[in-house]
Image (cartoon, rainbow, N blue to C red):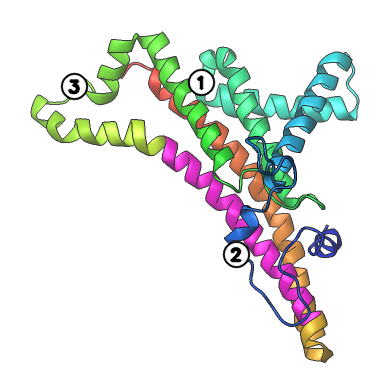
Amino acid sequence: MAVGSFANLSMLGLPMENDGFHAPGVEEFFPAPIFFAGTPFEMNRVMVIRLLAALVLLVFCVIYAKRAKLIPGRAQAAMESLLDFSRVQIGEEILEGQARKYQPLLATIFLGTLFMNLTGVIPGLQLAGTSVIGMPLIYAVVAYVAFIIAGMKERGAGTFFKEQLFPPGVPWPIYIIMTPIELLSTFIIRPVTLTVRLLANMLSGHMLLVLCFLGTHALYFSMGGGLGIGLGTVTLVAGILFTVFELFVACLQAYIFALLTAAYIQLSISAH
């Protein structure tokens, strides 16, 4: 993994030069278009990575649906374990008896976020589809709309908004303070925090990996000598360790995003 990442740095257009170390910047997340430039359909590297992640997930799901057997093979067992994890550890854990009707949504959010996150540690791609705000924002909007619609269907529109903004059992003067806070926290802060949490984790992870491998290149080929090789080996090992850690973070953030979506739905459909 680390060798693949190191070898592909220059191919991916990262700032790798022999005359010294050049720290990565946010411009990496806004690369030049590579397809359909100058048209409304122009696509850069980030968009290509997102489409590849979505296509791979779609292929896996179609193959799983068409070739499912009573005694699963390795590929089917792996796909079923992901779906079972989404159903049991996310849906049933939070929504209990209501989990079945929301499982398609939760599985879509979990698997979609997971596959987009994992592109950040795949050689040749090495950039998470969720490391630019567009994709985390879309997932957050889907979760936001889902918990509002779920609450309106289960509780009725009037009851839902009344319970969210005016929790029962509270002395009415307290509503002067509580209602604006509930409005802010429930209908504004929730989608923002969902977006920022996922974006910040994936963006910072990519920057950390690039920093390690660019540092390795600069120390090996610019500084040179025993000291440069020694320090470059340290940054190379750090890059490998951070790659493993980023893999863990990618899975964890997909789980947290889907779990919070289920929690918000549970809060919206439950009687206060």
Work out how far the residue at label 1 is from the one at label 3, CA to CA, in angstroms.
Answer: 24 Å
Residue 169's label in the rendered image is: 3
Q: Secondary structure at mark 1?
A: helix
Q: Quadrant of the N terminus?
A: bottom right
Residue drawn at x 81%, y 20% is 62
Indicate the amino acid at tag 3. Answer: Gly
Q: Earlier in the sequence, mark 1 or mark 3?
A: 1
How dense is the environment of label 2, judged by Cα within 10 Å: few (below 14), some, or many (20 and up)?
A: few
Where residue 154 sits: x, y (%)?
41, 10
Q: Earlier in the sequence, mark 2 or mark 3?
A: 2
Q: Secondary structure at mark 3?
A: loop
Where residue 243 sits: x, y (%)?
73, 58
Residue 186's label in the rendered image is: none
Work out how far the residue at label 1 is from the one at label 2, CA to CA, in angstroms.
Answer: 42 Å
Indicate the amino acid at tag 1. Answer: Leu
Q: Is residue 217 magenta?
A: yes
Please name whichever residue, 165 or 134, is drawn nearer the observer in this view of the structure: 134
* Among the 4 quarters of the image, the one containing residue 18: bottom right
* Among the 4 quarters of the image, the one containing residue 16: bottom right
Residue contact between numbered discs 1 and 3, judged by CB atoms under 8 Å = no
Q: Which residues are magenta?
A: 191-220
Where residue 131 sits: x, y (%)?
61, 48
Q: Which residue is mark 1?
A: 95
Q: Quadrant of the C terminus?
A: top left
Residue 11 horizontal side relative to residue 147, left or right? right
Q: Secondary structure at mark 2?
A: loop
Q: Earlier in the sequence, mark 1 or mark 2?
A: 2
Count the numbered circles shown.
3
